[in-house]
Image (cartoon, rainbow, N blue to C red):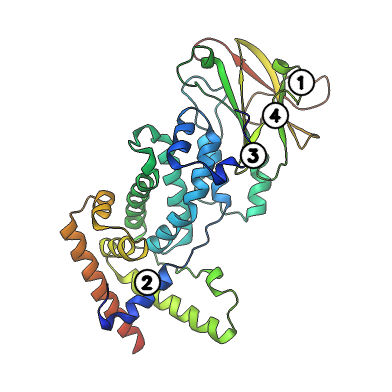
Amino acid sequence: MNQPLGIDKVEASDAELVRRVRTGDIRAYGTLVARYRDRLGRYAVHMLGDREDAEEALQDSFVRAYRSLERCDDPARFGAWLYGILVNRCRTTGARAARRRRMFVRDADALNGATHADQADRVEWSDTVNRALARLAPEYREAFLLKHVEDLEYEEMGRLTGAGVSALKMRVKRAREQLQRFLKEAEHV
Amino acid sequence: MFDRDDGALDRVIRQLRQPVSIDPALDARVMEEIAADAAPGRLATPRPRFPLRGARWPWLAAAAVLGAILIARPWSAGGDTDALNAFQFVLVAPQASSVSLVGDFNDWDPARSPMQTAQGIWATTVPLPPGRYRYAFLVNGVEWRADPGAPRAGDDEFGTPSSVITVGGKGS
């Protein structure tokens, strides 16, 4: 029990942390949360288009995962399992929020260090991207983000979403086509 | 991966792959919520739950508030009979530099139950035979804190806040 402070940050694998959580070491779950917060947060922010909704979905996913940890069959793949919970949670939130006006997220970090002119361009481009993304149907946006932003294989996407590989390929293709069209429309506004 | 005409899409993907900053206080909110979970029938008192929505404080404010949230949580560990009475005490205190659990069970000696931290979550586990115990947390070696979610001890003869946990048989 007396372990050096901070050991979780540099050494423990997901499987080891999950094992420790299951034996009652709640701190180990804090390390897993910190490990996956930003990566999963990026998906949630882009999927939902609203930072508050995204953080709520993320928090809820972490809590649900903790409460269901015994159902994580392969602790070495805790991250993928957690991803699946978040994907489902985002679907629920997205459906609930579909009629709300989407608020686009600009990441302040991405703008740091830019000149005013650069910054204005980046803000404009960021808004253009977010608007185009928001116009996609949720299933297209989900497939596009998982494939091209989170860089997942189709088989992994299938496990996360429950959709077949061919259906996912079709969704990604349609998403790409529609995004291209939306971007061209934005150029002519 | 892309056709020659996909330069714009490539730029979109690069934009979307930029890191997104998530409020680090989210970690503490998650930990506070799961620490509030209890093994059925074994928690000394019900724990307050954080609202999911509306907890959008800046990090410092969140840390200050969470620093005041102390949670003592019993866990059964493994299948060891002795460990069935091992209680894990957890404190969410991102800004603390040291925390010790002190109580009747360790003669109020901070050196006997120092708490270990990871990500601002402080925890220690102590075996407790059936009985009624007063306890508190000693933060940074000087600040005594009771557990606000547990019953307060009625006789703080030393003038410091403390809480009480009763360990009995099933359902304590």
Q: Chain of mark 2?
A: B
Q: Which residue shows up at 39% across the image and 61% down it?
A: A48
Q: Chain of mark 1?
A: B
Labelled pair 4, 2 in contact (Cβ < 8 Å) = no
Question: Alpha-carbon distance for marks 3 and 2?
Answer: 38 Å
- Quick one: label 1, few (<14), some, or many (20+) residues within 10 Å? some
Q: Is residue B65 left or right of residue A86?
A: right
Q: Is residue B59 left or right of residue B171?
A: right
In the current view of this chain or complex, which residue is farthest to the left?
A166
The image position of residue B19, as x and y in percent, is: 48, 64
Labelled pair 3, 1 in contact (Cβ < 8 Å) = no
- Quick one: label 3, few (<14), some, or many (20+) residues within 10 Å? few
Q: Identify the mark at residue A5; answer none if there is no mark.
A: 3
**What residue is disc 2 on?**
B13
- Say what secondary structure mark 4 lies in: loop
The image position of residue A59, as x and y in percent, is: 47, 47
